[in-house]
Amino acid sequence: MATLNEVFSGLSVERRYEVWFLRVGLADGSGAWWFRYLLMNPGRGGCAGNPQGMPVQVWATWFPAGGKPQSFIRGFPLEGLDISRRGQSPFHFRIGDNAIEEDSCRGSLEVDGHAMSWNLRYRSTFRVTLSNKGWIGFSRTPHSDALFSGQITLDGRSFAGDPVGFGVQGHNCGYRHRNFWTWTHAYFPRTGRPASTLEALIYEMPFGLVFRKAVLWHDGQKHGFRSLQESGVSRETLQWNFRCAARNGLRLEVAIDGRGPSVHRLLYIKTDCTGSFEVVNNSLASASLLIQSADLGERLETATGAVLEMVG
């Protein structure tokens, strides 16, 4: 059975990125972690001459509650990579002491005098393909309502538990990064009931078209929305408000707020190796979601359980 994590890129491809990532909001409220396992331009060895352009990379970003995020990135040569074949299941990606598999990941990095390690397992009940344009690129979510167990350490400080956190594990791939995109994932814990999640994505397509989609997982049901109508969006303050309606009459009003000290700005390398561009991310964003139908009115909220990312 396909799990949405299967490798798409062959190791001979010269221009392509493929990334497996996790957003882990810590259960104790102390912050969130963002992990990325990246394969870029393997057929040409990444972006030669750029110290940030290694073909294999492992990223760890710490978002402390009320503090400034810290990113730690380590690049590796392609020769050390052990990765499953294209389309093979179960999937694996291993480099040194770092690995991600279908329902687990681990890592160990020493960067700029800081030492961190993690060993996590995760489980979920919902997965979804948000966008699939084949060779051009895709956005998949193998674990949308993920619960994480295990341990993360940073400079001797330890975070551990079952669960240690909650969030999402995603898998993206593309010939190039889009010129602009806005993406969010929000995890709403619910006392005595399964968590709900909302994921939404807007990005630029050829010929002036724009991709728009949102998916709600609520009470064991998937609801898809195509016609997102933005009522407010700001890259400067990292806020995104929109509404949408499904064919069955279900309506959403969504407000994602990424303002505050947890806003993180990071440079991504272009796949054509001509330079870089800025990605703005807050993995401790707040979210408010109003669900309405003919016989339902329910509001879901989270103070720090969302991630909001914008480019362009």
Image (cartoon, rainbow, N blue to C red):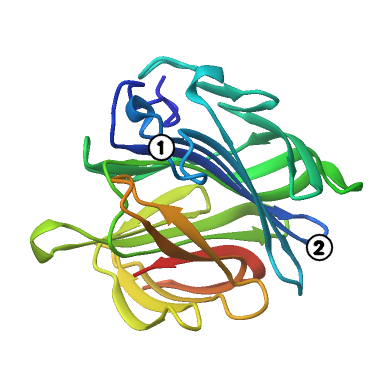
Q: CA distance from mark 2 to mark 1?
A: 38 Å
On-image quarter of the N terminus: top left
On-image quarter of the C terminus: bottom left
Q: Amino acid at mark 2?
A: Ser
Instruction: Give the residue at mark 2.
Output: 30
Mark earlier in primary sequence (2, 1):
2
Considering only vertical position in the picture, is 50 above or below 69?
Answer: above
Relative image position of residue 210 (x, y in whole percent): 20, 64
Instruction: Give the residue at mark 1.
Output: 48
Q: Nearer the viewer, residue 209 or 221?
A: 209
Among the 4 quarters of the image, the one containing residue 227: bottom left
Q: How many marks?
A: 2
Relative image position of residue 276 (x, y in whole percent): 39, 57
Considering only vertical position in the picture, is 278 above or below 85?
Answer: below
Which mark is in front, 2 or 1?
Answer: 1
Relative image position of residue 109 (x, y in whole percent): 73, 38
Q: Who's the residue at 28% across and 46% down the image?
A: 272
Among the 4 quarters of the image, the one containing residue 46: top left
Q: Nearer the viewer, residue 15 or 180?
A: 15
Q: Nearer the viewer, residue 293 or 65?
A: 65
Q: Is residue 81 visible?
A: no
